[in-house]
DNA sequence: GATGAATGAGTTTTCATTCAT
DNA sequence: TATGAATGAAAACTCATTCAT
């Protein structure tokens, strides 16, 4: 059943879109209200400030992403499987939840850098996978943060190019290619 | 000899720092004037608008980077050497010209997306290298934009982690590791 | 027996406190609702507007004070007795009904100046007492409004200092002192 | 020479008038700008906020008053002379500097209560005078704050009535009457 | 070239009041 | 009666840009 969108839902939706496209700073409360079909005042019944709205949005979506990723890793056993699932999860999320993904990336790269480090669970998860692989002797001994950076960079940049239409390759093939590449990066 | 910094120099310096740290939108002309030790009005003696200042800054620095990279590639012959030089050039630039690099990345990722595509010379250079490698049968046949994305992502994300102090590895070793990894990515 | 406080009672209580402490303008309906434990809408079930609420409150409390003062003057005969009772009444009221007194003073001094003059019964009563004393030849011939101003000022300012803890004297002694002083002011 | 009124002067003038008449809270930045013939933005070039404007205004005017009072007391020797000068100074200031006086009273009574106590120099001066009188055996032994409260109340309330036109007595006679009364209050 | 006060359009935020439930 | 989400008009405040000096 399609829940009747409440004003708050509309508000969040509108903010997500706009923040993603134009950035937080460049999005005005007027923009948001207009797009959400509400009055500006209404924003402040739900959030203390535009800033708080952005933060809450970020936290909520990061959490959402986090759960999504965990779901993807559920039935994996070996570090290889885990890494594969991790990468695929990233791609899937970016495809299925374009707005959420886009907002998370945009907000993270630029305007919400001050966010507490310990909220970066996905990154920690990657570190764990890599460490596990090393412990089991299946991955090369290399600083996990360095390896993590390379994997993350490879994945995120590819998604970015994909979105901007610069890669003329079938989606699934891209994913497979990136998965393979990431595995090659870290395996012995 | 250190030429006495002109007002314009101070202005550019201040703008670069601030744009990099806070983003263009979030940096006010007041911020810039304060940091540069000039008056707000002076900004408009040299640039038509804050926007133009940012664009000029971007173009100039991109050009600067471009020349830097070309210098790095001067005496390379094989595609492997070229790729290696390309990656090392990126790292060196990010280290020697922290402010310029930081600004370029920040501006590129977020606020100056509208910048004409043909200014992305470094990316085109990478594509050329990869294509050359494939033509010569030394690199795998794979979409050059996909490969380019992976290389760029690997390099840029590593630099990002490096800057934020998350990688506890000797700088040269990191560079070597990334170079090796990028080569592995594209070689047969 | 303590009747269970109705919503309206709570509302009035909260408004009284807040108006007294922060002033009418600076007290928001939200403040009131929060403190009263009711919803903002409920305010408008009982009063037409915040303004009306303040006015009603003022009138009611002034009336209450008026009755209180009259009670104090009931069995007085001579002008001296009357003046003494008047002053003591002021002090007693300010002590027993701190919130009411505080609100009346605050509202009177500042925000409800537009209140109809004829509501200032206590002041008129003072004028009457003074005039009576003069008629009977017991008080000096002096403009009653001037004398009234001096008496009122002496009393009210003393109460104000007393409340703010600046007078380190036993309460009853203060009252006696002020009574004596006021009598000295007006007597021959 | 009539200095050409700067925008800042106009601003301060306008704010003083309006704050005095309507209170700080009830005066809008728009009111001020309109009356001063400047734009709202200009307010913020000179003061950080409306609140700061009010505070600065208060401090400056209190200081001005303070200097005025000190001047009045310059050539006084006995406590009686001092008290007389103090009271007369109050009246004179309230007459010659109506806007300043009005603003000080209004702000003090209501909206700037949080102001640091030690700024209340005029009150402290009164205490000193009274204490001196007691030490010299010329004033009654009575808590100086209590006596101070009575004197202040008498003076301020009379000025208030005077301004609102309720006292139909020649100005000088009122002042003399109040001076006499205050002396009687404190003398043996 | 340089200044910095001034502007005014735009942005964020507040808040008394309304209204469907 | 009571609620509380929603409103919209107005308030405070910001800031790129202009301009007289």
Image (cartoon, coloured by chain):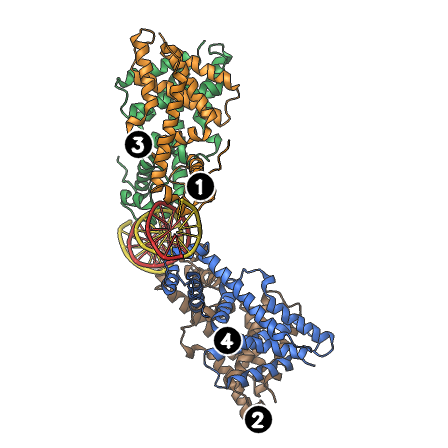
Chain colours: A blue, B brown, C orange, D green, E red, F yellow
| Residue mark closest to the camera, 1 vs 2 | 1
Which residue is label 4 attached to? A96
| Dot 3: chain letter | C
Q: Which residue is mark 1?
A: C7
Using the image, determine if residue B10 lies above or below residue B169.
above
Q: Which residue is denoted by mark 2 in the rendering?
A: B137
In front here: A63 or B143? A63
Camera-nearest label, 3 or 1? 1
F7 sits left or right of A103 in the view? left
User: Residue A12's quadrant in the figure?
Assistant: bottom left
Left or right: A171 in relation to C149: right
- Label 2 marks a residue whose chain is B
Helix, strand or loop for disc 4 = helix
Q: CA distance from mark 3 to mark 1?
A: 27 Å
Instruction: Please give left or right for residue C54 compared with residue A172 in the image.
Output: left
Residue A69 is situated, as x and y percent measured from the top left of the image, at: 59, 72
> Which labelled disc corresponds to residue C115?
3
- At mark 2, the secondary structure is loop
Vertical position of residue C128 compared to residue A140: above or below: above
Q: Nearer the viewer, mark 3 or mark 2?
A: 3
**Residue appearing at x 52%, y 83% in the figure:** B146
Mark 4–mark 3 contact, CB under 8 Å? no
């Amino acid at each position: 059943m399609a829940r009747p969108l409440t004003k708050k839902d509309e508000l969040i939706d509108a903010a997500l879109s706009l923040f993603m496209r134009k950035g937080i700073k460049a999005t005005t409360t007027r923009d948001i209200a207009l797009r959400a079909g509400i009055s500006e005042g209404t924003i402040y019944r739900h959030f203390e400030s535009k800033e708080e709205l952005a933060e809450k949005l970020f936290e909520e979506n990061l959490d959402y992403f986090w759960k999504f990723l965990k779901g993807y890793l559920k039935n994996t056993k070996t570090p290889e499987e885990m890494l594969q699932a991790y990468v695929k999860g990233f791609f899937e999320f970016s495809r299925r939840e374009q707005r959420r993904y886009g907002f998370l990336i945009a907000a993270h790269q630029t305007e919400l850098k001050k966010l507490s480090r310990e909220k970066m669970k996905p990154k920690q998860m990657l570190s764990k996978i890599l460490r596990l692989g090393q412990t089991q002797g299946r991955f090369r001994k290399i600083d996990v943060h360095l390896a993590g950076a390379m994997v993350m960079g490879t994945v995120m940049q590819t998604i970015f190019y994909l979105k901007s239409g610069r890669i003329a390759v079938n989606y699934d093939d891209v994913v497979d290619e990136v998965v393979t590449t990431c595995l090659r990066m870290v395996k012995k």
